[in-house]
Amino acid sequence: MSSPLASIVQAGTKLWLDSVDPELIAANRLLGASGATSNPIIITDLIKSGRFDDQLQQLLNDPDCSTNSTTWALTDQIVATAQEDFISVWESTKGNDGYVSFEVDPLLEDPENQLAHEKRVANYVELGTKWSAGNRNRMIKVPATRAGLEALEHLAAAGVPLNVTLIFTMRQYVAARDAIWRGAQRLASLDKFKSVYSIFISRVDVYTQKHVPQLSPSAQGQVGILNAKQLWKENKRFWAEHPTPLEQEIIFASTGTKNADDPPWKYVEALVGSDIQTNPPATNEAVEASGKTFIRTVDQMPPAAVVDEITQLVDSQHLEATLMAEGIKKFADPQKALLELIEQKGRELAPRA
């Protein structure tokens, strides 16, 4: 009898770990994880553990290394180490799986950052290209903001594997997909073209609980799942009409439950059978401890009455505006905290001769 996580993989889902912790990667590789993702919170927690003090010390010994450059150099090293754990997957799937996502500087979207729009777009292109270079199984993570979306065509045309994050609505997904496809068509070959689209799920249900309390009990808590399935269905339709050697996939992200009354595998169970799930380590642990056997559910839509109710009552424009405002803050603040931690560590680990 297969384990719960193994049953998810067997049903057709790729499991990517929402962490680049070497110990968690080792444990989750045994459970079927075939990729990973990183962000400033994950990097901060790893640095707080003290396990990377020696690498940090070496960087701090360079008198020309600023706090910012030290932070990015260490992030690069941590992500590169995770890539080594998945490179065999990337090779065996010829580039269809085995990626580790690297997030471009979140401070580009800091509301306090008064960068002109054109400069912000140029920085996304410059940094995305820089951090992708020489990394076969690294995906560059770009948010579905106005500047991020505008940078995607240029990055795709440069051959950069892309993970578009902070997607909450069909409008954002279509804008991202179309921009990337325009860029991909400028490539000499599509053989290595790879893109994924990270649809955030649980945050949508948090939004509706606060802003759409009039939803019926059968609809409340189902909006994130319905939204993800609709975007997944549209993604399948588009790429069936525009086939590529590698799969262009949806990432079901933000799969950790926020409602204490929900089973921790609520979103995982509802989206089994295709594409990618990036699950937090705690969610994977809960799934594995559940003893359940998971089957394909990704193409099973809620009852028509529930779909109609959600369509009528949920304003997707307001949802996007609200969640993007929150998302940008959640995007920028952790990077500021990471920079502060590196400064603190710099004082604790005084450069040694």
Image (cartoon, rainbow, N blue to C red):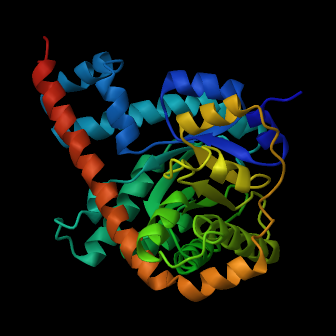
Quadrant of res 220: bottom right
198 horizontally vs 55: left or right: right
Q: Is residue 38 visible?
A: yes
Q: Position of residue 44 (x, y in %)?
A: 32, 35
Q: Give the mark count.
A: 0
Residue 4 versus residue 228 in the image, above or below: above
Residue at screen point 47% across, 74% down: 213
Query: Looking at this view, is 60 or 213 the one in front?
Result: 213
Residue 269 versus residue 43 in the image, above or below: below
Quadrant of res 84: top right
Residue at screen point 34% across, 56% down: 331
Identify the image quadrant of the C terminus. Answer: top left
Quadrant of res 211: bottom left
> Given the current orientation, which residue lies at the most extreme top position?
353
Residue 142 versus residue 90 in the image, above or below: below
281 horizontally vs 243: left or right: left
136 horizontally vs 11: left or right: left
Query: Looking at this view, is 285 or 236 the one in front?
Result: 285
Residue at screen point 68% across, 55% down: 192
Residue at screen point 80% across, 57% down: 297
Identify the image quadrant of the N terminus. Answer: top right
Q: Position of residue 12 (x, y in %)?
A: 81, 48
Query: Looking at this view, is 240 or 225 the one in front?
Result: 225
Q: Is residue 271 visible?
A: no
